[in-house]
Amino acid sequence: MTHRPKRLLDQVREAIRLKHYAYSTEKTYVYWIKRFILYQNKRHPQEMGDKEIREFLTYLAVEENVAASTQNRALSALLFLYREVLRRDLELPIELVWAKRRKHLPTVLTREEARQVIGQLSGVHRLIVQLLYGSGLRLMECMRLRVKDVDFGHRQIIVRDAKGGNDRLTILPDSIIEPLRAQLAMAKQLHEQDLAHGYGAVYLPYALERKYPNASREWIWQYLFPATQRSRDPRSGAIRRHHLHESTMQKAVKRAAKRAGFCRFCFCSQTRRSGVTL
């Protein structure tokens, strides 16, 4: 019995998962590789190389007028394809085609302005922003926090697999301890409901799910800020409750900033630069 060779995009997905890249990275890389193949009239990338990549990047910059960051994401995807999947070295120094990003000063609010924005928030959105400001967390670091990562006794939070793949500690402000305990109580109630309906599992990183088959249903592994609905895992197909999506926070803060009169407020650049402790 002969086995069909894996399709190119399946090989890309497999290589990405072997490196434990985020699912968002997987989607982005697959998207740009598809765009590249379609632009080159569905030719197989094995038949192409540096010349075709330059043509595609030039098209993005000149015809589609994309931002430098977008062009660089496309390039990163293609570099991954050739180096990690096709195992090919490009003929010319591809680093020459990296687009230069324009430098912009971040929008930074004063402490009083930040408090005005937070004052327009309520519920879990308000708590998350208070945690971001008080602990210096990045947005996705906060979204991915699990029950076991919060240490009330030592007033600290353990950030797992942070930027650079390292763990780190950060402070847990006294002012949000009680709201955080209330959030944990709501999350636990939701988890117990899931268990009663035959669900209750969460995604576990790396090979932990195989090593500890029952850990995904344990309370300590649940997300601190669970999503309101269960969803199907795009990789495994399992129905689970994931954490809140970061876009919900971005939209909530954007609305709050508008109500506070800061129309040009940028949530992503602001969260770790104000120095506000609430």
Image: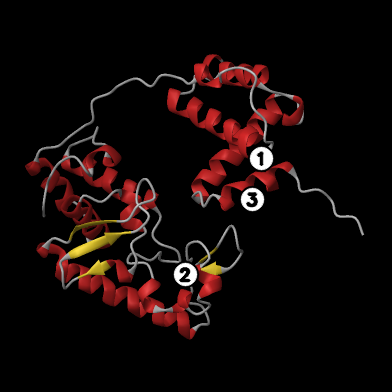
Q: Is residue 235 left or right of residue 250?
A: right
**Toward which corner of the image does residue 75 lie, by quadrant?**
top right
**Toward which corner of the image does residue 34 lie, by quadrant?**
top right
Cα–Cα span, label 2 and label 3 = 21 Å
- Figure colour scheme: secondary structure
As drawn, 72 above or below 163: above
Cα–Cα span, label 3 and label 1 = 9 Å
Where is residue 69? Give x, y as percent. 44, 28
Crowding at mark 3 (Cα within 10 Å: few <14, some 14-19, many 20+): some
Amino acid type assigned to the residue bearing label 2 in the image: Val
**Toward which corner of the image does residue 44 lie, by quadrant?**
top right
Disc with the residue nearer the chain's start (2 vs 3): 3
Disc with the residue nearer the chain's start (3 vs 1): 3
Where is residue 28? Give x, y as percent. 54, 40
Give the labeled residue for mark 1: 85
Q: Secondary structure at mark 1?
A: helix
Q: Is residue 245 left or right of residue 116?
A: right
Amino acid type assigned to the residue bearing label 3 in the image: Glu
Give the labeled residue for mark 3: 14
Residue plotted at (68% across, 25% down): 39
